[in-house]
Image (cartoon, rainbow, N blue to C red):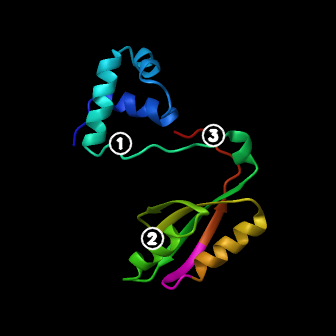
Amino acid sequence: MRLTPADEQLLSVLRENARASTAEIARHLKLSRTTVQSRIERLERQGVITGYTVRVGDDYERGRVRAHILITVLQKQMPAVVAALRAMPEVRSLHSVSGAWDLVAMGVVPSVGDMDELTDRIGAIEGVERTTSSVILSTKFER
């Protein structure tokens, strides 16, 4: 599916604030409200936009411990490992990657002790061969 540059700009604005009104988005993109609304509806119909989510404030996030958890999975165990990780609310996202690791998870917990416990739980999942974690010190920007 091919998106126009205007569609890409619209998605960028929605990533920044999905709760922005159609009028606000239209002013920002210098388009009519009708055009913005029809583009959003089309992107939803096409499955480009599949939902809207919440982003918590920086002050709240700064109080949390976040880490990228790199995971190696035994062959043929990927579906079960993914299902187990999906069931852990502390795992915010999971990416399949190329290279020495099979998956990269984003873990978010209240404390260092909780991160230690989370990485232990991930390492104990049947099919997980090994993990390595990198604690995130700061986020320079996020879209």
**Local crowd at mark 1 within 10 Å, few (<14), some, or many (≥20)?**
some
Instruction: Name the residue tied to disc 3.
Output: 140
Q: Position of residue 52 (x, y in %)?
A: 45, 43
Observer-nearest of 33 and 14: 33
Q: Position of residue 112 (x, y in %)?
A: 77, 64
Q: Residue furthest left?
A: 1
User: Which corner quadrant of the image does residue 37 belong to?
Assistant: top left
**Local crowd at mark 3 within 10 Å, few (<14), some, or many (≥20)?**
few
Instruction: Name the residue tied to disc 2.
Output: 102
Mark 3 or mark 2: whose residue is earlier in sequence: 2
- In space, the residues marked 2 and 1 are separated at their CA atoms by 27 Å
User: Which corner quadrant of the image does residue 113 belong to?
Assistant: bottom right
Q: Position of residue 80 (x, y in %)?
A: 43, 79
Q: Please give the range of residues in magenta.
A: 125-131
Instruction: Name the residue tied to disc 1.
Output: 49
User: Looking at the image, which residue is at 63% across and 67% down?
Assistant: 133
Observer-nearest of 121 and 132: 121
- In space, the residues marked 3 and 2 are separated at their CA atoms by 26 Å
User: Looking at the image, which residue is at 41% across and 23% down?
Assistant: 22
Is 103 left or right of 31, judged from the image as shown? right
Is 60 left or right of 43, judged from the image as shown? right
* Label 2 residue SS: loop
- The three-letter code of the residue at mark 2 reads Asp
- The three-letter code of the residue at mark 3 reads Lys
- In space, the residues marked 1 and 3 are separated at their CA atoms by 26 Å
Is the residue under label 3 in contact with that under label 1 (CB below 8 Å)?
A: no
